[in-house]
Image (cartoon, grey):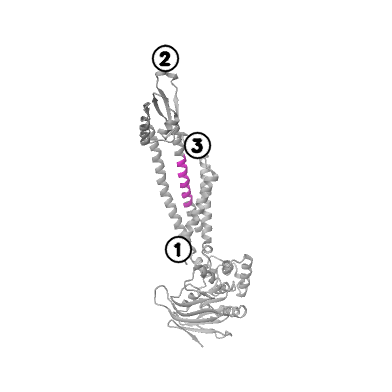
Amino acid sequence: MKSISSHFSVIISVFVLLFCFQFANLVNKIVDDYADKITNDYSIIVVSSAEIKEDELKKHVSEVESISEISSKKILDRLKNDMSSKNLALLQVALPKFYSIKLSAMPNKKSIEAIKQKLQSISTITRIETFAKTHEKIFKMFLILQTMAYIFMFFVTSIGVLLIFKQVRIWIYEHNRRMSIMTLFGASFFMKSGILYRMTIVDSLISAFLVCGFYIIVPRLSVVENFAAGLDIVLPTFDILYEGGLILGISLIFAIVVVTIVSRKIGRV
Amino acid sequence: MEHVIKASGLNISYGRDEPIITDASMLVKAHEFVFITGKSGSGKSTIIKSLYGELIPTRGDLSVCGVELKNITSSKLNLLRRYLGVVFQDYKLIDEWTVEQNVMLPLIIGGFSKSVCTKQAHKLLKHVKLLHKINKYPFELSGGEQQRVAMARALAHNPVMILADEPTGNLDSYSSEVIWNLLKGAKEHLGTTIVVVTHNIPSALGIDYKHYFLEGGVLHEVN
């Protein structure tokens, strides 16, 4: 019973640790996806007296991803019945050009101001519309959420690390007599600590599999899918090969490092 | 290697305390049977501890099995200990291991195969008349039985030298006799060097031995 509870404390601590790590990944992915989405939806409208070429514009404003002309056909169609075709032709020539500019990344208030100034420096541009307020708020909200998630994960991870160190210390005290007897018969460090390494590695592997299982199964549950859809969020799929391998690797490295540090510190018998 | 132990001008102390052993010199040839006697607290166990490297002398020269113990690295010390068999007064058996596993310990450390370990453990446990308790744990044995297991463990890897710290100190006459016979047998049949720390040398041992007497931290050879 005592042995099971000591295993549980390591499994739970490593699980929490890996869970937080993967959760940070997930939050990052969701925020990046959402930022991409907003960036795609977001555009700056400019009015220019002359044609703007994309290459020229990019030289002035590096943040520009693409530029597309907004057709004036609709405006002219509306005026078709009220004006003569001659006047309509004259108006078409005199009408300024409207452009929609897409940016390469989601801008904040500061960068929108900077982009606006750069655009203003182009002499042919007569008017710029940036819609700064709406997007600034959404962007800030995401940054706050991301930061809060990181702070939370930092504390949880710290507690997890402390718990694991404490548990391995307890193990070492429990195995101290055996380790000291083995030392008297010439056992090497790794032979003495072998049991601890085995226990921690097995517990870490169990935790890694549990975390992988959680992130594979939970996003596929219809309740979670519906909830995410309600928030207009697409939950990224768990990459078993890359993310699973990373979690497995982290758990193994963590187990080996923790046992080595603690047994070197205490196990000098 | 003519001398298994070469010690000269040894001072041994615990930490920074006053030395318990001062200016001790000792020469032990291979295959010799050596007794170190002395009153309680005279430092007999301290000498044994220095011979297997648990205590490093603060002064003087000490070599065991040709290995200089001054400034010895932990890997070299581990290697040296694999050539020694040590018997402790408090047995030092691993509580969570069975009798068989305890006897196999030096063989496991020496990297022997499982079949060799098992065969040797069975042979030695038969010698110490504990084969029937092979799967018992140390806490299920009497003091005498535990010491016989410890003796079997010390002999398991055919060590160059056995260091025994009051091996019969707490034992009944039967267990004491088994221990002395094993030590005698190891010297006679395997050529093992034996160094025993004890209060009393058994009268009917029937072998030649060297005798050191420890008094006031000073080691004297008794002729």
- Residue A229, image x, y percentages: 48, 34
Please tell me whether mark 2 sits on a helix, a strand or a loop: helix
The residue that label 2 is drawn on is A88
- Chain containing the residue with disc 2: A
Q: Disc 1 or 2, which lies upstream in sequence?
A: 2
Question: Is residue B108 magenta-colored?
Answer: no
The residue that label 3 is drawn on is A225
Residue A191 is labelled as: none
The residue that label 1 is drawn on is A266
| Extent of the magenta region | A13-29
* In front of the other: B184 or A126: A126
- Residue B132, image x, y percentages: 62, 70
Q: Which residue is drawn at 61% across and 77% down?
A: B190
Amino acid marked by disc 1: Ile
- Chain containing the residue with disc 3: A
Q: In which quarter of the image is residue A69?
A: top left
Label 2: few (<14), some or many (≥20) within 10 Å?
some
Distance from Cα at disc 3 to Cα at disc 1: 48 Å
B43 relative position to A117: left or right: right
Tags 3 and 1 touching, CB below 8 Å: no
- Chain containing the residue with disc 1: A
Residue A103, above or below A195: above
